[in-house]
Image (spheres, grey):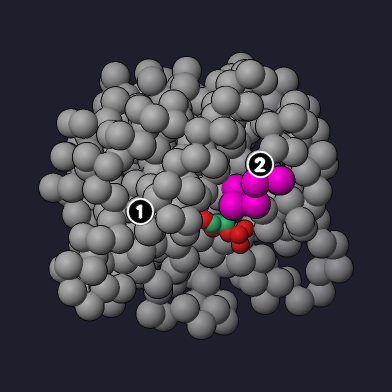
Amino acid sequence: MLTSLPSILEKAQKKHYAVGAFNVYNLETVQAVITAADKMKSPVILQTSEAAIKYAGLENLGALVHLMAKKTKTPIVFHLDHGKDEKLVVEAIKSGWYCSVMFDGSALPLKENLKKTKKLVALAHSKDVAVEAELGAIAGIEDFVSVEERDARFTDPKQAADFVRETGCDALAIAIGTKHGAYKFHGDCQLDFKRLQEIRKLVKVPLVLHGASGVPAAVKNLAVKFGAEIGEAKGVSDSAIKKAVSLGICKINIDTDLRIAFEAGLHQFIEENPKNLDPRAFLSAGRDLISKTVEQKIRLFGSTKKI
Ligand code: G3H
Ligand code: 13P
Ligand code: ZN
């Protein structure tokens, strides 16, 4: 069943676990995520990026998720991920498909981010849609040459509290050293947990961790074995995720790990079955590996049996 973002995140925040937000863009990814959530009895967020909408169409993705969500008792939130184009955010809010949207004004000057977020929150709330906002640049610790530069770009706790109060947003994505994609760290995984603790103390709404893929060894090795050139890929460690959850993160965004799983499954099947001419067979292999990856994330985030 479809539900609201605040309803599942507030419960997660109280009970100290996190809900996974997984990027979807076609039939197989939607099926894989919902199958895993059903099996694990876990609430789940299915999110579409602007690029996913461009690829598959807003209505198509909305209808697909709605149809499948209606067939299960598992709480499902359909969410717009990283809405940077205000027009698209407004379209998503008005479309009736989305339970929540993210307005990502993080690249804008603070005042402009605040003003635009506030305006979109008012519109969204009038339509019963929740809003995730973003403050700070989601980038790895290694992306900054100095501590001063990092301090200027990571989320400032006091600024975050003021931003949430003034905009009325329902959840806040924060920058503490994670970044998008498969190449997050050269050396050890480092996150600014002290900053997270300070933000948690001052900000009452649920906090969101983007760029949280772990690039799990088993799936990465399988992808590499079957031809992927991603040897240097490195993600957020499981222990860092657990610590982030224990310090108050309650929505965790995962895309890259599902992409690696999908590709690994596809490549393995194609290589091992060179005579196969049925795309449904290799798509199923990719879909199964995505589903297994989602199950592992749900276990890691602690949201098993939380429906
Ligand atoms: O945070 C971004 C997601 O990984 C979406 O990526 O824009 O290529 O769909 P995408
Ligand atoms: P990853 O690239 O680490 O999977 O992050 C995804 C994300 O933050 C989507 O918004
Ligand atoms: Zn993100």
Q: Position of residue 102 (x, y in %)?
A: 54, 41
Q: In the rendered view, would you say 209 is above or below 200?
A: below
Identity of the amino acid at label 1?
A: Gly
265 and 198: which is toward the camera: 198
115 and 265: which is toward the camera: 115
Q: Position of residue 302 (x, y in %)?
A: 33, 32
Q: In the rendered view, would you say 47 is above or below 230?
A: above
Residue 47 visible: no
Residue ID for mark 1 = 136
Task: Tell me: is circle 2 under 8 Å from ligand 2.
Answer: no
Task: Tell me: is circle 1 under 8 Å from ligand 3.
Answer: no
Where the N terminus falls, by quadrant? top right
Q: Position of residue 48 (x, y in %)?
A: 64, 46
Q: What is the span of residues highlighted in magenta in the rendered image?
A: 83-88
Bin the neighbour count of mark 1 within 10 Å (Cα to Cα): few under 14, some 14-19, many 20 and up.
many
Q: CA distance from mark 1 to mark 2?
A: 20 Å
N-terminal label among 1 and 2:
2
Q: Is residue 84 magenta?
A: yes
Q: Is residue 240 magenta?
A: no
User: SS at mark 2?
Assistant: helix
Bin the neighbour count of mark 2 within 10 Å (Cα to Cα): few under 14, some 14-19, many 20 and up.
many
Q: Is residue 74 left or right of residue 13?
A: right
Identity of the amino acid at label 2?
A: Val
Q: In the rendered view, would you say 225 is above or below 18?
A: below
Residue ID for mark 2 = 89
